Image (cartoon, rainbow, N blue to C red):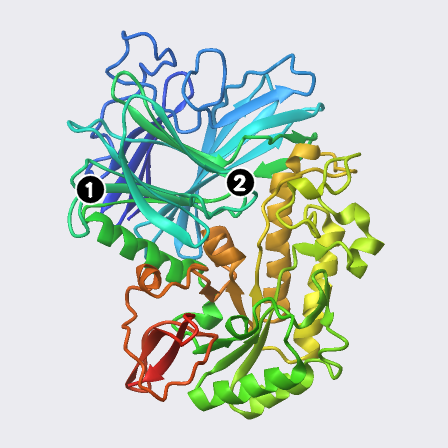
Amino acid sequence: MGIQKEGKRFLLSSEGSSYLLEISGDGLPVNLHWGGKIGAISELADPDSVRNFLHRSGQRERVVRQEYPGWHGALFTEPALKVSTVDGSIRNCEPLFQHAEISSENGSEILELHLSDPLQELAVTLVYRIWHDSPLMERWALVRNQGNQVRRLESVMSACFQLPQLPRPYRLTHLAGRWGREGMIDRIPVSQTKTVLESRSGLSGSGAMPFFALDQGDASEDAGDVWFGTLHWSGNWKITVEQDGYGDTSVCGGIHDFDFSWDLRPGEEFKTPVFSFGFVHGGFGEMTNVLHRHYRSHLEVPAFRNRCQPLIFNTYAAFGSGEEMREDNVREQLETAARLGCELFILDAGWQQAIGDWTPHRKKFPNGLRPLADRAHSLGMKFGIWAELESADLDSELCRKHPEWIMTFPGQGFRKELAENSNRALLNFAIPEVMETMLEAIDRQITENALDYFKIDMNRCFSMPGWENPPASGSRSIWVRYVENIYELFTGLRKKHPELMLENCACGNGRADWGMQRFFQRNNRSDNQVCRRRLSHQPQCRTHQPPDDSPAVSGVCGNARISGGRPQTFRMFENGAGETQGVWRTV
């Protein structure tokens, strides 16, 4: 395993797969192989006949298989990079190879291909990482403005993948769905067309997830060749699967180019998200195992790696949005949770003064949250709270003090008819001060109340993605700067509170991507609480009929497990009011 170089040919080898590319005679990085293991680095033909004219058949023995195609007039497939001058007079680019570097870092090897486009005065670096303990590889790109004029990035993808020609058509597996029904497996044949998987809501899910898998139509859970990849990004994304008239199939993916542009000033650099990808012989089951092992080894927070999830009591099932929540009835729920053997008590919506004002409600919790946290700790439970930091009630102190922080188009104000909640706005986290204020607010609650757990939620889509005073990168950079500041917030929380457990909810699985999950210990996989459908999200759970004396207790959820040598199961049932309820019990 590792990276080998022979002339201008580079072979990336991981457990069970190989990835071979070469620099063509005209300076284009070209893919020669992605799939099963190959032996000698010189085993495959050279790419010197590669051309961009897909409508001509004269050079089809080695087709256009570029690793990172820049758009120009002769490229008709999905470009990885589209750049223009600000006035639009120069709109084409074609980065060509300059030199390569191979290095080692933290149990991995890294290949950097340095390209340059003298017309646009851009330096482009393609980065490939091979892990010594994982079959997955990684790709991303860096684009730097080397000139003295602004360059406008109109599309800047993380990677393009070229699939081998096969005797049978490819089949695409992707994850589709909606709120309450996320991550549903869908499979469609690949034909001569462009299939676009995407999210344009500002979040990475729930209608689709940034993942693809391709097979020859015959892969099962236990057998078959599968090519696959997943993008580490929590905002708008796009993955295109494209087949041309000659049967060549490519995949291109990264940050969505819809409504996106980024004005790159002289000397500035833009870095794309990481795209993890791999190939397996053992079907979708092996693919899933490879992804899970890689996540646990390289993305999961080390302090919580291999820890069992705690048995959770969440007050949302008891109080909903929390209008009736008060200190006295929360104390009653605390006592009930302790009797059931719960290990973590979460105070969900209703504790706050307002959405946006993240302090305890003065009337409902006159003593603050610390007495409740102390009581939970005295009962042997951990204690946590919920917050939706990216939203704010219009009548909150925050919105009254900083109306300019509300996400909306200039001159239009907050348009209630475009909002999912007419009295609640989405904050523009692309503004650094918004992120810093929210980080300070939630950090104060964590510190003052000795919190063990924090659940972050996000229940809004971007319906008015504008701002009054955008930075030099331009108003359409909002999609990227927003996500980068979300990452900055959780980087800050993780640094200040390394033992704090974090839950990623986002309306239930709305941000289940690896860009977000690297900060969290638990992902709220769905808001779907219907008993039978819950099993599709948690197939390891076993259901049981409750005995006659089972209490009508709400708010308990978690993962099936063995604890202390004793099996624990999640029991789901309906109470007399027809409400779905469930509880974990040791059996």
Relative to 124, does residue 450 appear above or below in the rendering? below
Q: Which of 328 and 93 lies nearest the eye of the viewer?
A: 328
> Which residue is label 1 attached to?
225
Above/below status of 206 relative to 338: above
Question: Residue 51 falls in which quadrant of the image?
Answer: top left
| Left or right side of 283 for 571 | right
Q: Nearer the viewer, mark 2 or mark 1?
A: 2
Q: CA distance from mark 2 to mark 1?
A: 29 Å
Looking at the picture, which amino acid does disc 2 mark? Asn
Q: Earlier in the sequence, mark 2 or mark 1?
A: 1
| Mark linked to residue 362 | none
Label 2 residue SS? loop
Q: Is there a contact, CB below 8 Å, between mark 2 and mark 1?
A: no
Per the image, label 1 sits on a secondary structure element best described as loop
Residue 236: mark? 2
Q: Position of residue 39 (x, y in %)?
A: 19, 38
The spot of residue 350 in percent (x, y) is: 64, 70
Picture layout, residue 333 above or below residue 428: below
- Residue 365 can be seen, yes or no: yes
Label 1: few (<14), some (14–19) or many (≥20) C-alpha neighbours in 10 Å: many
Location of the C terminus (image quadrant): bottom left
Q: Which quarter of the figure has residue 295?
A: bottom left
Query: How many numbered discs sit on the rendered protein?
Result: 2
Q: Which amino acid type corresponds to the residue marked 1 in the rendered image? A: Asp
Task: Mark 2: give few (<14), some (14-19) or many (20+) Cα within 10 Å.
Answer: many
Relative horizontal placement of residue 16, taking residue 411 as reference (left or right): left
